[in-house]
Amino acid sequence: MSKAQIISCQISFYPLYTEKVNDAVKEVIKLIEDSELQSESNSLSTNIFGESKQVYDLLAKITDFMADKEIKFAMNCNISNSCGCEI
């Protein structure tokens, strides 16, 4: 069995068509924190580190969560498999 692929993913999340931008961003940060993946947030983006399946599952969870709340958004994701990170 092959070793799990560790990746990093830099996410910038932009709620659209809402005045409650901060609320939506806080919801995304909470989903990331609850995922138990390693993460680092700053004012522009959040970096996530973990097994590729877990990271992609989190991106799907964010998408589904926002769809359930009927929040439109744009989310830029930069993914690297050469992050040099260890989990």
Image (spheres, grey):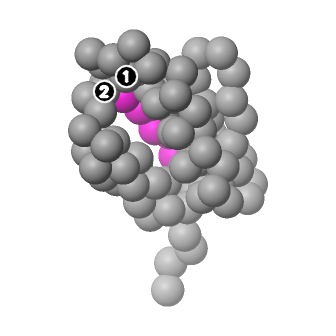
The residue segment tinted magenta is: 75-81
Q: Is residue 63 visible?
A: no
**Residue 76 belongs to the span the image colors magenta:** yes
Q: Which amino acid does label 2 sit on?
A: Phe
Which residue corresponds to mark 2?
73
Q: Is residue 43 above or below residue 60?
A: above
Q: Where does label 1 land, which residue?
A: 15
Q: Badge 1 local density, few (<14 within 10 Å), some, or many (20+)?
A: some
Q: Check whether the beta carbons of the residues at disc 2 and disc 1 lie within 8 A of each other.
A: yes
Above or below, 72 against 87 in this view is above
Q: Does the magenta stretch include residue 15?
A: no
Q: Is the magenta stretch mostly helix, strand or loop?
A: strand
Please report whichever mark, 2 or 1, sits nearer to the chain's N-terminal start.
1
Occupied quadrant, residue 14: top left
Q: Position of residue 59 (x, y in %)?
A: 40, 48
**Element under disc 1:** strand
